[in-house]
Image (cartoon, rainbow, N blue to C red):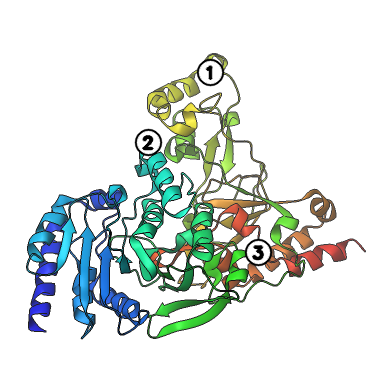
């Protein structure tokens, strides 16, 4: 016992020293987030409970780092027989010290890229891993294609090019596991909601027996320097039985979750957003109206550079720029204190901060001739702007997306622990201002717009109904990140129930 405690103390000291030699940016790019000791022990204790008591342990960690999970295994294994233990670490910065730390134990650490390693002759019955959280844009195109091909060969998993490295780890590890072996993957929970996670979810439902997904409360960030919401995905390497039920738990610990619910595999196959569970019930298909039945929902304008294309009135006047080449735009939500935006006689929003979007349709040569001051301003930033994807991909590099003002605007992200307790705000916009991509814009569909014409009182009632949507309903359709940051995409907001608003609009038909 004392030796194990001493080893863990040494490991934590080594980990801290090694991390100090790398910047947070470097470790983020490589997806290097060490697992805290308490969490590692919780995970190992639960993993061991899923294996028969009499079964010897063959342990594998494909991204072992300094060995947090192996250290936890030694602490929690008790009298059970440890037959083998193997780990892979691609970064010698962590791998070399780990080899030295554990050289007097039965842990075999290979300093190699797990995704290129060949499976051992003897497979493993307990795979526990916190794989590198490397986003797809940090993977080279050739590397993505290799990983995709290897994943198809190993597990029949056809991953998207948008999948992060951790998804490829799960697919490739399939062939390393023994029949009925247990895997526990500590990964970002976002795979449960996003498009690139569809194939991973299919694998979990069809190729293995998904046992449990325990999701941590996002306000309790598991890793100090990773703003992700984490989950542990548990499965057995067996095909799922008929009528299989998967346990979803949330908050607390594996042993004492805040809430837990069983969801059938069939219901999961028909649900796009698994993070609804266990706090939400299974959807019942009753042709319930949703927001997309009533509104076209679009992200606000992505300018390519807000600092360059969005200017204050004072700056426009100081540079003597032509106001006719600008249109009003809402400032960031943090500068909009009220949820109702009034307008002046020109239709500009009455706010403490007046901002305008540069939005000129003229070709560059004509603009230079007609508006010399604006031409000089554009020329001052052209070199930098043309290096940006959005600007260089436009027919006219400074021309913005076509967007009409919308009467209803929703904030794109927020925290559930705000003063209102609501991460998303719906604004009633009386002005002609458009919005940047920190907002979602709700445009009434033609049949709705026709009934709303000339009825400002009904616009207000719809706005009030939007704000009456339960926060839980909105959060269950959106996604959540570490620290309790919630985000909503247009397609997610579109799925929110709109029963009250639909009834309100339908009653207008009889007026």
Query: Observer-nearest residue: 34 or 98?
Result: 98
- Mark 2–mark 3 CB contact (< 8 Å): no
Residue 159 coordinates in the image, percent (x, y): 47, 49
**Which residue lies at the image location 29% right of the left edge and 74% below the top edge?**
39
Pointer 1 residue: 364
Q: Is residue 251 left or right of residue 113?
A: right
Q: Residues within 10 Å of mark 3 (few under 14, many from 20)?
A: many
Snapshot quadrant of residue 291: bottom right
Residue 285 coordinates in the image, percent (x, y): 73, 69
**Which residue lies at the image location 39% right of the left edge and 36% below the top edge?**
141
- Mark 2–mark 1 CB contact (< 8 Å): no
Q: Quadrant of the C terminus?
A: bottom right
Pointer 3 residue: 496
Q: Which circle, 2 or 1, is nearer the viewer?
A: 2
**Which residue lies at the image location 60% right of the left edge and 64% below the top edge?**
269
Residue 409 coordinates in the image, percent (x, y): 62, 54
Q: Residues within 10 Å of mark 1 (few under 14, many from 20)?
A: some
Q: Quadrant of the N terminus?
A: bottom left
387 over 257 or under it: above or below: above
165 over 311 or under it: above or below: below
Pointer 2 residue: 142
Find numbered disc 2 in the image and state the secondary structure of the residue it sits on. Answer: helix
Q: Is residue 487 visible?
A: no
What is the CA distance from the residue labelled 2 to the residue labelled 1?
38 Å
What is the CA distance from the residue labelled 3 to the residue labelled 1?
43 Å
Q: Is residue 177 left or right of residue 331?
A: left
Q: Which circle, 2 or 3, is nearer the viewer?
A: 2
504 over 443 or under it: above or below: below
Find numbered disc 3 in the image and state the secondary structure of the residue it sits on. Answer: loop
47 over 338 or under it: above or below: below
Q: Tell me which numbered mark, 2 or 1, is placed earlier along the sequence.
A: 2
Residue 371 coordinates in the image, percent (x, y): 54, 20
């Amino acid at each position: 016992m004392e030796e194990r405690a001493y080893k863990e103390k040494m490991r934590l000291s080594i980990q801290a020293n090694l991390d100090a030699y790398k910047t947070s940016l470097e470790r983020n790019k490589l997806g290097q987030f060490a697992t805290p000791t308490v969490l590692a022990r919780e995970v190992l204790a639960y993993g061991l409970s899923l294996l028969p008591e009499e079964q010897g342990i063959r342990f594998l960690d494909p991204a072992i780092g300094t060995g947090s999970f192996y250290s936890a295994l030694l602490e929690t294994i008790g009298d059970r027989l440890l037959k083998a233990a193997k780990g892979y670490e691609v970064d010698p910065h962590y791998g070399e010290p780990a080899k030295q730390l554990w050289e007097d134990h039965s842990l075999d650490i290979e300093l190699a890229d797990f995704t290129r390693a060949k499976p051992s002759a003897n497979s493993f019955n307990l795979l526990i891993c916190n794989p590198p959280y490397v986003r797809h844009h940090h993977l080279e195109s050739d590397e993505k294609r290799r990983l995709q091909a290897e994943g198809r060969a190993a597990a029949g998993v056809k991953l998207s090019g948008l999948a992060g490295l951790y998804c490829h780890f799960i697919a490739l590890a399939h062939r390393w596991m023994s029949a009925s072996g247990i895997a526990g993957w500590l990964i970002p929970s976002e795979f449960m909601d996003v498009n690139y996670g569809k194939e991973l979810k299919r694998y979990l439902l069809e190729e293995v027996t998904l046992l449990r997904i325990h999701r941590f409360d996002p306000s309790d960030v598991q890793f100090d320097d990773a703003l992700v919401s984490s989950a542990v995905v548990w499965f057995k390497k067996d095909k799922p039985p008929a009528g299989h039920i998967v346990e979803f738990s949330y908050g607390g610990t594996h042993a004492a979750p805040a809430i837990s619910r069983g969801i059938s595999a069939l219901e999961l196959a028909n649900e796009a957003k698994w993070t609804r569970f266990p706090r939400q019930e299974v959807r019942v298909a009753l042709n319930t109206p949703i927001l997309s039945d009533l509104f076209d929902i679009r992200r606000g304008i992505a300018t390519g550079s807000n600092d360059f294309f969005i200017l204050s009135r004072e700056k426009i006047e100081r540079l003597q720029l032509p106001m006719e080449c600008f249109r009003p735009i809402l400032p960031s939500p943090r500068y909009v204190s009220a949820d109702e935006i009034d307008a002046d006689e020109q239709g500009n929003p009455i706010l403490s901060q007046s901002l305008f979007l540069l939005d000129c349709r003229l070709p560059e040569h004509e603009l230079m001739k007609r508006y010399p001051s604006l031409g000089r301003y554009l020329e001052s930033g052209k070199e930098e702007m043309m290096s940006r994807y959005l600007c260089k991909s436009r027919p006219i590099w400074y021309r913005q997306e076509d967007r009409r003002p919308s009467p209803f605007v929703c904030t794109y992200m927020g925290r559930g622990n705000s003063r209102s307790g609501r991460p998303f705000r719906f604004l009633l916009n009386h002005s002609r201002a458009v919005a940047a991509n920190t907002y979602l814009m709700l445009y009434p569909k033609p049949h709705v717009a026709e009934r709303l014409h000339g009825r400002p009182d009904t616009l207000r009632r719809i706005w009030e109904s939007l704000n009456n949507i339960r926060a839980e309903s909105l959060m269950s359709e959106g996604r959540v990140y570490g620290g309790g940051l919630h985000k909503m995409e247009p397609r997610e907001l579109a799925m929110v129930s709109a029963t009250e608003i639909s009834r309100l609009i339908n009653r207008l038909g009889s007026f």
